[in-house]
Structures are given as structure tokens and as C-alpha cells.
Amino acid sequence: MALKKHAALILSFIAALFLDTAVLPKWNLFSMVPFVMLACMLAAEQVFSIQTAILIGALGGLMEDLLCENMIGLTSALCLLVAVAYEKLPKDSDTKPIILGIYCGVLAIAVEFLRALVAWVIGMRFAFWTAMLYGALPRGVLTALWALAGMAFFKPLLKRQVDNP
Amino acid sequence: MKKLWRNRPILIALLASALFLVLAALTVGRRTASRAEDMFSGAVLPVQEAVSDITDRVTDFFTRVFFPNSIQQENERLTKLVSAYERRLILYEAMEQENARLAELLDYASANSNFYFMTAPVSARNLDPYVDTITVRGGSRSGITEQMAAVTAQGIVGRIIEVGATYSKIRTMQNEDMRISVMVERTRDEGMLGGLVIENGQLVGLKLYYLPKDADIQVGDTIVTSGLGGIFPKGLYVGKVIFLTDEDNGEYDACVTSDVDFEHLEEVLIILGKEG
């Protein structure tokens, strides 16, 4: 079962990378693009462990930056900060999906905020509120939904693993 | 290290994120890739291309399945766009040609600055060899009167024979009844030009006659107006001698061809008068 868990994680990682770098930038609805790698990382953190999330966030962010020719390392750094923040949020095993969804959404918006902040610091022109309202907000909501879907996908694997160690 | 990874993941995450931020700061605004990046990019490039190709195909497939109308509309839109561009291209080419013709006329007018010229666009033509006339825009309101000369940069076109308020008719050199006093530019021998030389049903040139018997005319000589008769100013280019006739012929002495393309005339210059 552990093999299945790892296979599912690797496949999800590849799918997230593929979606973020190749599919969603080209094919999306009203230019609303979820951050699938972040969603994958948050789902892995919720269901498995923060170590898994750190690996996914660091590797995934780095590869996305390299593939999309962004500032190399920025996405990884933001993902890792989100992983730490998510770990520090109050959760227990009974935390309802809606609460988790809000956490994920807020963190996804925070990522966009930080990205905007970096852009401003390096002197890029930036319509801050427009980007927040029409970019970060829908992106955060969609990312939260993807994260919840990821949690629902990963959870059965973990349960079986616990049931059959 | 393994212990640290298990017990202090948050510390490791914070350190790693700090390192990544440093890396990001170092790569801001950098255009050239490092050797490591270059190698990595080289390795992932085929994958990236393959992924991009697959994505394009998948996108294309779903677009065709779910939005067939959008493709049709896009096709129609692009077809209209291409038609509009083709129309603009034709217009542009026409403007370019007109510009070249007008520039040529302007050069001619500048070279003959002792005359007052007016540009008149050709609006109609009758190319019957016996009644050969062209109609141009511009008439008495523009100061045109009968017997004025019409020229182009290639030579004399003809003279005004009829003037309306806004149009004028020009009898061209190719008219059977047209006569012009000319001279051989090299020898200054004067003669008369008029009447058509037709061989095998084809117009070859214009007849040059009344030259002095001892005139030293040669093939290739330039023929210009002599100024006699008062219609055409002296010294305007008419054409070149293309062949001489036998002395016994008697009808005409030489054949002169004009460089003016009468069948494709689009603008002419009307000589309104002379300075002074």
C-alpha cells in the first residue's frame, strides 16, 4: 500500500506540474488559473506529513520556475512558507473540509500577495488591487477547491495504509 | 540529518525557503542561463516540446468537439480579415504606383520650371487610331484652353481640342490628323511629324517628313518640338527615329516612335503657359 501511496503522490506531482506549466496557462476559463502544485502540496500536508509537503513544494516550485522561466526559486520559497504556515494553523482530525478550504484559499491568496510584493520590490509595474481582486481571489478559491479534491483523493490511501500497516 | 528532517521540518522548510529566496534574488533580471540551468533546460526541452504538442492537440480536439461554432466563426472572421488586408494591399499598390507616376511628373515639371503645369488625371480614352482622344479631369475652371499642349515625362501626349467646365479632350499624337512641327535635336533640321506608320496592322510609329534634302538624319536621333506653330513650346521631347525610308519613297523620310504608353496613360501634365 505504501507503494501505492508513493505512486499516487508522484503521479499527482507530475499531473500538477503538467497542468501548471502546459495546460492551464493555455486552456482556462476566463483566465482563472488554479495553482495546482500548491493545492497538491497542501493536500499532501493535510493527509500525509509536512515533510512530504516540503518535498513537493520545493521540487515542484523549482521545476515550475525553470519551465516557466520565472525567478528561479521564488515559487519554491513561497510554497515552503505556505507549508510552514499551514502546519501552524489550528487543525485536528475533525477539522471540517470547509475550514481546510478556507485555510487553503487564504494561503493561496497570500502566495499571490507575496508574489505581487516581490514584483513591486524589483520595480515591476503592477496594478495591485486589480491583480488581487481579479487574479489572486479567484485563483485562491480555485486552488482551495483543488486542494480539497486532493485531500479527498489522498485520504483513502492513507486510511488503508493505517488499517494495513 | 535524518533526525533533523523528522524532528525539525519547519526549521528545514524555513531555511530552504530562505535559500530559494536568495536564489530568486540572484536570478532577477538575469537573461543568460548558467551552465547548470542550460543543461537542465536542454534536458527538459524535448519533454517541454512534447508536452506542448500534446496540449495543443488536446486543446484543438476539445475546441473542435465543444465549440465547433467558435472555429467556424473564427474561420469566417479570419477570412474577412484576409479579404480586408488584400483590399488594402491592392489599394496600397495602386497608391504606390500613382506616387511613382506623380513623382516622375513632378521631376519633369521641376526640370522644365520655365513652364506652368497642371496635373490632369485621365478619366476616359478613345483609342481608335483615327479619332484617338483622351479625356482628362480639369477644364476651363482650371484655366485650360484649347490648343494647350499635354505632356508626360516620356514625351508629348497631344493637344487640347475641346474644353468643358470640368473636363478637356486631348487629341493624341496617335491621331491620324495630328501634326507637330519638330526638329532633329542633333542637327537642328526641321520637319513635320504626323500620320501613322502601320505595318501588318500594327502601329509602328509616326511619320516624319518635310526634312531638308541634305538633312543628316540617323536612326536613334532624338526628335524634339521646334516651337513653330505656337502650340508646343520649343525643345520638348517627342521620340526617337527608328528607321529611315528610301529617298525615292517621297511619302515620308523617317519613322519616329514615342516613348509614351498611350494605352496606359493615367495622368498628364497640361502646359498652361510660359514664365514671363
Image (cartoon, coloured by chain):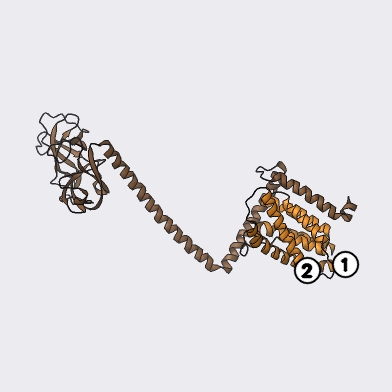
Visible in this render: residue A36? no
Colour brown belongs to chain: B
As rendered, which of B247 and A62 lies closer to the eye? Answer: A62
Crowding at dot 2, Cα within 10 Å, few <14 / some 14-19 / many 20+, comes out as few
Closer to us: mark 2 or mark 1? 2
Query: Residue A162's mark?
Result: 1
Left or right: residue A165 compared with residue B231? right
Q: Chain of mark 2?
A: A
In the rendered image, residue A31, in percent from the top left (x then y), is placed at 62, 62
- Answer above or below: position of B235 versus B79: above
Left or right: residue B29 compared with residue A94? left
Visible in this render: residue B69? yes
The colour chain A appears in is orange
In which quadrant is the C terminus of chain A drawn? bottom right
In the rendered image, residue B108, in percent from the top left (x then y), is placed at 27, 39
Per the image, the residue denoted by label 2 is A99
In the rendered image, residue A65, in percent from the top left (x then y), is placed at 70, 51
In which quadrant is the N terminus of chain A drawn? bottom right
- Answer above or below: position of B204 versus B164: above
User: Which residue is painted at 19% across and 45% down in the image?
Assistant: B203
- Mark 2 falls on what kind of element? helix
Q: Amino acid at mark 1?
A: Val
